[in-house]
Amino acid sequence: MLKGIKELLEILFLWCFIYLGAFIFLIIGIVHIQSNQPPIIKQYHTYNAVQVIETPKQVLVEREVCNRIDGCPVLKGVCESCETVKR
């Protein structure tokens, strides 16, 4: 009878050893996998775009404008009815 109890205890201890060994092996594996992963770095970039709008510069241009409907009669290289206008 003692021999039977001894064999049952040996089977129970062997089962507990295998069960606990597998549990410890699982914990070590999870820790090892997590320690080998590259770190996750969260970077938040903010970009501020500033648009500078320059007011258009007005350039004055001198033009000769004829006041006659039928055109400019040129006498001696000078039109008598043209005016010089700055725009």
Image (spheres, rainbow, N blue to C red):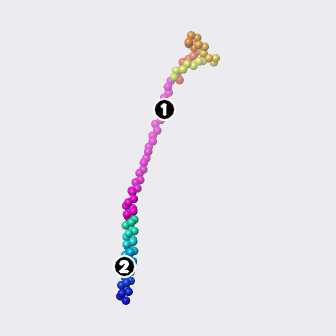
Q: Secondary structure at mark 2?
A: helix
Q: Residue at x 57, y 14 (%)?
A: 79
Magenta residues, start to end:
31-60
Judging by the rendered image, the residue that carries numbered circle 2 is 13
Could you say which quadrant of the image residue 69 lies in? top right
State the image quarter where residue 77 is shown. top right
Residue type, numbered disc 2: Phe
Q: Reply yes or no: does residue 80 show up in magenta.
A: no
Tell which residue pokes out farthest to the right in this image: 70
Q: Which residue is mark 1?
A: 55
User: Which numbered marker is on residue 18?
Assistant: none
Residue 46, relative to residue 23: is it above or below?
above
Residue 47 vs 80, above or below: the answer is below
Residue 59 is inside the magenta segment: yes
- The answer to which of marks 2 and 1 sits earlier in the sequence is 2
Disc number lying in front (2 or 1): 2
**Nearer the observer, 20 or 54:** 20
User: Which kind of residue does numbered mark 1 sit on?
Assistant: Thr
